[in-house]
Structure formats: structure tokens, C-alpha cells
């Protein structure tokens, strides 16, 4: 691939390009949609986009069951002790960046200890998660809904959200939230900003599954100029002005925040912290892929339209590519700087999405996408899952069970699952039904 970069556009243009290229549907119901392009873009950031299968060409994927020294992985012990750590290191250094561990000063303030909500179906908790005694540090504002009738610890779906929690659920008891405004690089009331990411909470409560969410901007604003306001800036060394080539990007920061929420879940006796599934859409689909891969405490992952940089194959030249993601005018801040080194020749990269999927094994993973979402390459996500299947099998679990790409509305809900709705990027309301079926099958809320 040839790297051709356009001059950096204004911040307003950058945001418009981001939403035009990445959003047709939103996750949830009854909320405004981001702008939708009339057709799949043929040029982004001065880089051509291929949508022709005939032009994909041949490629060879990195083998998850081949050690770096060229020896094969023949048993689960070798996978856990040697090969898996090798793959984790690749993604830490070459794609997402290395994140710090659990902060020593982490604390949880439960400001709402359990209030009846949602017409009596739920018990609501609101929690502030702090990472430092310094009040200037970012904080996570978490809301948790538990089934009101539950008498034992429940499984839970944690969905990371594009909106503040007060916009994610129709609940007047929620504290008013704030979001980042990229135009001013300041926080504004959530009610005055773009709002999408509405959660379908009640069907999960009815099934005995809790639901929790938080705003991704609590960790790191989603634009380059927001770095100084995010968690990553707090870990810069004194005098350091540029991040290291393998330092964490925003996706790793958002994923790190999900792990900090899991830290809280481990303290809440009403939540079964060993049965927590995570969910995110688009760039937050990439986020949950990495969160689930990196933190094995999460019991299951549902990634919606994670595409390039997530579950779609980078070695396959179709739709968005590493070059598009890391172009200066787009999203280099979301990844380690090293990721950009592979933009011109992703076929040479030592990692790809099939390896990322294997890091979630043997835990359940559902890849949800849309059959017309060419930009995110739904077929590339399917092929990545097929290529990861041998690791699920090695660990005693079921892969997809087929190498034939299914049509839309034909879910595969094995340990490794795949589903396309009939439509474009993101979620449609009926996707929630598939999610619920998947979680009931794998989290067993009846226990």
C-alpha cells in the first residue's frame, strides 16, 4: 500500500470525517443518529479505499500456534506459558501501547448505594472511581442496574458508552453528566452535546443480568487536543513532552478504565465479578476487544463493528486500513505510535486480528457487524475468527464451526460467535436480542 497523506484538516472537519466514515447506526433506540454518508467513501485522508474483493490479493496471516522461535504450539500449557505472552507483548508494543497497572491510590465512592429505579425493575447504584488522591485527576462515573428481584450475585453486562450515563438510560434519578466538547476542549453538560448510545437495560434485568455503563471520555477525550485532560497525561514523566513509541493510546486508556471498573465489581457483593461481559461499538468495539484480550477477568466480550484495529484483518486490503487509522489527520492518538510504522505494509506486521481474537480464548466472544458496513469489513472479521478457531479448539472450546461466511440474520453463537444484521455500521435495536441470547447461553443467569 502507498501512504498518501492530505494536509491536516481543521478539528471540525476531523470530527465530521470521523462520524461520516464510521456511523450509520447507533447502539440503542430512540436517539439521534450521527451523520450518514450517502455512499461508502472511496478516499479518506488522501488514501484510496478498496471495496473490491478481486483487488484484495493474497496474504498470509501470522500463525497463533507458532512460537516466535518457529516451533509449533501443541498443547495448552505451551499456549499459556509462552505463546500467549508473546502475542500480548506484540499488541502492547506495536498496536495499542503499554498501559500502567492498577493505581495504588484507586478508590470507590458509592454515592447511590441502591435506589429502586426503572419502574421498580432495578436497583440502581452510582459509583465514582478515582485513581489518585489528587482531585484534578480524571474519574469514572459509573452507573449500575441490578435486577430488583435478585437474591444472589448476578452476572452483568458492562457497556462502555459514547455518552454520559445520564444520556444512556431514561432514568431521572441519574446525576446530570458532562461530556467533552472538542471545539472548546472543555466539559459541557451532556444535555448540550451529541447524545447517542442508548442502552436497552430492561430485557437484561428481566433475564437476571445486570447492566452497567460509563462515559469513555471520563478516561481520555476522543480528539488529539484532549490529551492533557486525560488519564494518559497523568502518567507522563516529569519533563516529558512526547509519548514513547510504545506508550498507550486512547483505546488502551479506555480499556484500562474498563479494568478499573472490574476492580470495583470485585468489591460489590451483589455482582458476580467472574461473570462480567463487556460491550462496545465501533472504536469502543476495538476497545472491548483489547480490554478482553488484556484482562482475563472479563468473562465474555461482545464487539460491535470493531473493524480495522479491532477484529477485522489488517493483512487483508479491504475497507479501512492501518494507513487510514494512523494518518495524521485521523486517529493516531488512539494507538501506540509504533502502529503507524505498519501503515504502508501491514502484510509485514507480526500481529493481526486473528491473534487478537485468540487472546480472548477460551472465553466467549461475539463479533457483531452489519452486512453493508464495507468500511469496517465484516467479512474480514469473519475470516479473522475462522483463523482464530484452532486456538479455541486447543483450549477445549468451539470455534465458529464453519469457514463459509453466513448471510445477515444468521447468528453463530458458539464460544466464538459471529452475527451480521441487515444494514450498516453500529447497532440496530434487534441486535440486543442476539446479545441477550448469547449472554444467557454463556453467563448462565439462572445459576
Image (cartoon, grey):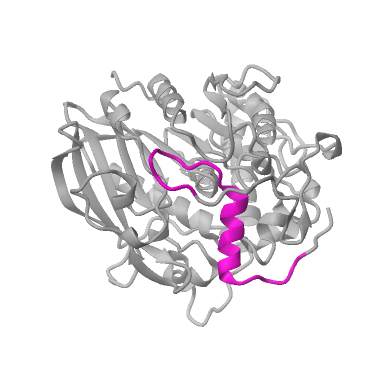
Residue at the image position 51 percent from the left and 82 percent from the top: 239
129 to the left or right of 414? left
Report if residue 217 is visible in the image.
yes
**Label tally:** 0
Horizontal and vertical percent position of residue 373: 63, 38
Q: Which quadrant of the view contains residue 278?
A: top left
Vertical placement of residue 341 versus 42, above or below: below
Residue at the image position 54 percent from the left and 49 percent from the top: 283
Instruction: Locate the C terminus and report the quarter of the image it occupies.
Output: top left
Question: In front: 427, or 324?
Answer: 427
Vertical placement of residue 410 versus 370, above or below: above
Pick out the residue farthest to the front: 38
Residue 18 forms part of the magenta stretch: yes
Pick out the residue farthest to the bottom: 239
Horizontal and vertical percent position of residue 390: 66, 24
Residue 155 forms part of the magenta stretch: no
Q: Which quadrant of the view contains residue 7?
A: bottom right
Vertical placement of residue 243 versus 93, above or below: below
326 to the left or right of 298? right
Vertical placement of residue 231 versus 118, above or below: below
Report if residue 333 is visible in the image.
no
Horizontal and vertical percent position of residue 176: 25, 58
Question: In front: 10, or 417?
Answer: 10
- Give the magenta-colored segment's residue range: 5-33
411 to the left or right of 355? left
Horizontal and vertical percent position of residue 36: 58, 48
Q: Which quadrant of the view contains residue 187?
A: bottom left
Residue at the image position 60 percent from the left and 24 percent from the top: 408
Amino acid at each position: 500500500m502507498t501512504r498518501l497523506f492530505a494536509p491536516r484538516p481543521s478539528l471540525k472537519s476531523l470530527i465530521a470525517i470521523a462520524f461520516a466514515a464510521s456511523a450509520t447506526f447507533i447502539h440503542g433506540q430512540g436517539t439521534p443518529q450521527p451523520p450518514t454518508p450517502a455512499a461508502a467513501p472511496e478516499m479518506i485522508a488522501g488514501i484510496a479505499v478498496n471495496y473490491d474483493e478481486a483487488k484484495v490479493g493474497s496474504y498470509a496471516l501470522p500463525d497463533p500456534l507458532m512460537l516466535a522461535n518457529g516451533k509449533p504450539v501443541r498443547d495448552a500449557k505451551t499456549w499459556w506459558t509462552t505463546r500467549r505472552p508473546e502475542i500480548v507483548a506484540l499488541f502492547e508494543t506495536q498496536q495499542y501501547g503499554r498501559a500502567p497497572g492498577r493505581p495504588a491510590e484507586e478508590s470507590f465512592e458509592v454515592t447511590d448505594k441502591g435506589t429502586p429505579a426503572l419502574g421498580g425493575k432495578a436497583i440502581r447504584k452510582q459509583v465514582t472511581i478515582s485513581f489518585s488522591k489528587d482531585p484534578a485527576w480524571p474519574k469514572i462515573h459509573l452507573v449500575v442496574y441490578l435486577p430488583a428481584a435478585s437474591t444472589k450475585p448476578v452476572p452483568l453486562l458492562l457497556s462502555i458508552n459514547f455518552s454520559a450515563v445520564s444520556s444512556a438510560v431514561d432514568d431521572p434519578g441519574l446525576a446530570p453528566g458532562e461530556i467533552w466538547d472538542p471545539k472548546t476542549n472543555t466539559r459541557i453538560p451532556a444535555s448540550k452535546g451529541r447524545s447517542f448510545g442508548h442502552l436497552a437495560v430492561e430485557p437484561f434485568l428481566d433475564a437476571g443480568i445486570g447492566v452497567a455503563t460509563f462515559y469513555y471520555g471520563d478516561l481520555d477525550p476522543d480528539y488529539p487536543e484532549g490529551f492533557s485532560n486525560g488519564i494518559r497525561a497523568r502518567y507522563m514523566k516529569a519533563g516529558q513532552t512526547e509519548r514513547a513509541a510504545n506508550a498507550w493510546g486512547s483505546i488502551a486508556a479506555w480499556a484500562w478504565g474498563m479494568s478499573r471498573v472490574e476492580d470495583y465489581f470485585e468489591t460489590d457483593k451483589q455482582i458476580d465479578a467472574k461473570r462480567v461481559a463487556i460491550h462496545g461499538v465501533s472504536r469502543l468495539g476495538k476497545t472491548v476487544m483489547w480490554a478482553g484480550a488484556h484482562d482475563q477477568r472479563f468473562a465474555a466480550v461482545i464487539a460491535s463493528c470493531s473493524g480495522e484495529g479491532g477484529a477485522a484483518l489488517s493483512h487483508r486490503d479491504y475497507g479501512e486500513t492501518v494507513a487510514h487509522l494512523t494518518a495524521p489527520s485521523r486517529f493516531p492518538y488512539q494507538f501506540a505510535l509504533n502502529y503507524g510504522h505498519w501503515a504502508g505494509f501491514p502484510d509485514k506486521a507480526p500481529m493481526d486480528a486473528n491473534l487478537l481474537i485468540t487472546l480472548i480464548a477460551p472465553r466467549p466472544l461475539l463479533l457483531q457487524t452489519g452486512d453493508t458496513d464495507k468500511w469496517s469489513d465484516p467479512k474480514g472479521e469473519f475470516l479473522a475468527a475462522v483463523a482464530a478457531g484452532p486456538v479455541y479448539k486447543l483450549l477445549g472450546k468451539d470455534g465458529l464451526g464453519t469457514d463459509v461466511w453466513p448471510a445477515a440474520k444468521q447468528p453463530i453463537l458458539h464460544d466464538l460467535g459471529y452475527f451480521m444484521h441487515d444494514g450498516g455500521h453500529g447497532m440496530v435495536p434487534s441486535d440486543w436480542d442476539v446479545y441477550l441470547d448469547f449472554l444467557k447461553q454463556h453467563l448462565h443467569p439462572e445459576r
